[in-house]
Amino acid sequence: MWYEILPSFFIITAGIGLPGWGLYHIHNLTLGNHYRRGLHTFWERKQYHRDTRLTGNPYIVNGLEKIPDE
């Protein structure tokens, strides 16, 4: 019957979904926020420092309104 596929469906769904869900919470415990921000390249480090300088928190989404007019 059709319901015989439900156990396999739940196992596959858990195998795909749990790692991402778990990392979301592991990043919160280790980094203090829910999002990991890699600093592997020069460009990523530059953006990280720019966001820290403008708002004090590199994980806040910045727009053009955050850049001060001179």
Image: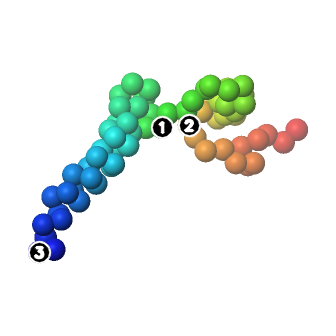
Count the marks: how many?
3
Q: Is residue 34 above or below residue 17?
A: above
Which label sits in the foreground, 2 or 3?
3
Counting other residues with Cα less than 10 Å from the Cα at mark 1, is it few (<14), some (14-19), or many (20 or more)?
some
Q: Position of residue 29 (x, y in %)?
A: 35, 28
User: Is the C-beta separation of discs 2 and 3 under 8 Å?
Assistant: no
Residue 9, can we see it? yes
Image point (33%, 49%), residue name:
17
Q: Quadrant of residue 52?
A: top right
Q: Which residue is mark 2?
A: 59
- Front residue of 56/30: it is 30
Hey, what amino acid is under mark 3?
Answer: Met
**Element at badge 2?**
loop
Q: Is residue 55 above or below residue 3?
A: above
Which label sits in the foreground, 3 or 1?
3
* Of the image marks 3 and 1, the number of the one nearer the N terminus: 3
Q: Is residue 49 above or below residue 34?
A: above
Specify whether 7 is left or right of 61: left
**Tag shown at residue 63:** none
Hey, what amino acid is under mark 1?
Answer: Tyr
Q: Is residue 61 above or below residue 28?
A: below
The outermost residue toward the right is 70
Q: Position of residue 60 (x, y in %)?
A: 58, 40
User: Is the C-beta separation of discs 2 and 1 under 8 Å?
Assistant: yes
Q: Which residue is mark 3?
A: 1
How far apart marks 3 and 1 lie (CA) works out to 42 Å
> Where, quadrant-wise, is the C terminus in this rendering?
top right
